[in-house]
Image (cartoon, rainbow, N blue to C red):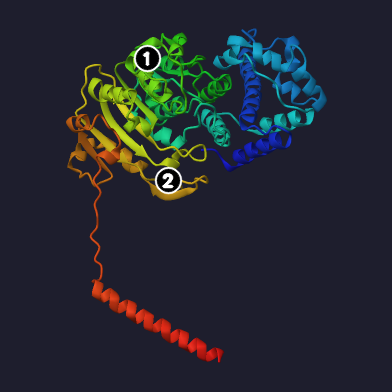
Amino acid sequence: MITGEIKSQIDKIWTDFWTGGIANPLTVIEQFTYLLFIRRLDEIQLLKEKKANLVGVPLKDPIYTDEQKELRWSSFKNADPEVMYHLFQKENGVFDFMKNVGAKGSVFAGFMKGATFMIPTPRLLDMVVQQIDKIKMEDRDTKGDLYEYLLSKTATAGTNGQFRTPRHIIKMMVEMMQPKQDDTICDPACGTAGFLVAAGEYIHENHKDWFNDAAFREHYNNGMFTGSEFDATMMRIAAMNLQLHGIETPTLISKDALSEANADMDDQFTLILANPPFKGSLDYDSVESSILKKVKTKKTELLFLGLMLRALKTGGRCAVIVPDGVLFGSSKAHKQIRQELVEGQRLQAVISMPSGVFKPYAGVSTAVLIFTKTNSGGTDKVWFYDMRADGLSLDDKRNPIKENDIPDILKRWSELENEAKRERTERSFLVPFAEIKANDWDLSINRYKEIEHEEVQFDSPLEIMVELRQLDAERADALKKLEELLG
């Protein structure tokens, strides 16, 4: 858990950026990320030097040469602001070195094309460097929590309906899917990599013993996590987020997930966790052809469902956030993808979420779909849950409140065998395949939920007339008294 001291330090750095002239939150995070990476490069070299000195051997594969000493964090942090700023700006200086460090800097360095140094003044650079230098970042938990807190400070939506998924909703989805030891986990629209990070944290919290196995450690560090993201800024932030959470070499794919360039994402993953873009429309010729065979549409939220079905291995599971329109849309494509999920695969759950979950980014109503790829059907009954509260107010402020359905969702999901007893008037219930088919594959909870009306007793018309006459008499008496007072 991030401490109050670190929060205050991050808040101070954030304020320094804003007062220093950088007002775009994503730009702040990106510049902050570059400085964290530069500090990290020096920390890696210091560790290598310490090990080499302990055993009395020459330093192997140094990140910095002796001639590059002035480019190291431990060196330039003590320089005058003007000198430090010149070291960042000059050709083959600090920033150029960071961009060209290559494999030595691990996966983050592979996405530095297009990176731009945007800190406008020596004073601001010095202030931020000194603040970052004070932050203690010795362990994985602190580094990860620090970066998550930094990411939480942005309230700007991205383009094409992209916005940051609330961490508690991500955690709920991960806990429902319970990542397994041999899973290969993918988010095809990973943004800042929140789902991948949460999956890694779930494993650390629930299965520490897995890390005693060398084969699992190799799998965790190199093959378990894959993210795809088209936006270069988001990709850099995702890479840093994963690294700071201890996932050193994830597979990160800088491609449009729906395009022909990503056609090789096929039958690869055992678990997909995602919140793909909602608002977007693509021309048919820009979409990979096999996705269009699953669902012929231009709507990105439907195309991503087609992509996930293609990318999953048979037996693979998926938890994905979709806008409500996917559940009941009447177009041919909407019905086609719903029929595919229910009839062609195994749809297990539809969790309807309130519209305020994504505020202040957007007020769109959403749902979580959980399904398993079978290519041979298997849907027997679908579990529906009507989430009404997530522990935060459903307005733009999103303040903490007592009401929270998430613990109940997790409990009922883990005891699914008991759900058959529930009535349609309750918060959750099961709906059989035949009923969904008869309703034209409609997956909106209101189609199946029964509303329990309470009987209200009203007074008889005669009693109401007596009350009205009494009120009329009281009004007349009050007017008479007022006239007497006025003389």
Q: Secondary structure at mark 2?
A: strand
The image position of residue 173, as x and y in percent, is 37, 32
On residue 218, which mark appears?
none
Q: Which residue is mark 2?
A: 391
The residue under the point 30% across, 25% down is 335
The residue under the point 47% across, 9% down is 261
Q: Quadrant of residue 460?
A: bottom left
The image position of residue 479, as x and y in percent, is 47, 84
Q: Is residue 68 left or right of residue 289?
A: right
- Label 1 vs label 2: CA separation? 37 Å
Q: Quadrant of the C terminus?
A: bottom right
Q: Quadrant of residue 305?
A: top left
Task: Looking at the picture, tell me which residue is in the foreground, 265 or 37.
Answer: 265
On residue 291, which mark appears?
1
Q: Secondary structure at mark 1?
A: helix
Task: Looking at the picture, tell me which residue is in the foreground, 446 or 169.
Answer: 446
Q: Is residue 373 left or right of residue 96?
A: left
The image position of residue 243, as x and y in percent, is 53, 22
The residue under the point 61% across, 18% down is 44
Q: Is residue 340 above or below residue 135?
A: above
Q: Quadrant of residue 412?
A: top left
The image position of residue 115, as x and y in percent, is 65, 18
Q: Is residue 27 left or right of residue 93?
A: left
Q: Of marks 1 and 2, which one's residue comes earlier in the chain? A: 1
Asked if the residues shown at circle 1 and circle 2 are in contact, with their CB atoms under 8 angstroms apart, the answer is no
Q: Amino acid at mark 2?
A: Gly
Q: Is residue 386 left or right of residue 423?
A: right
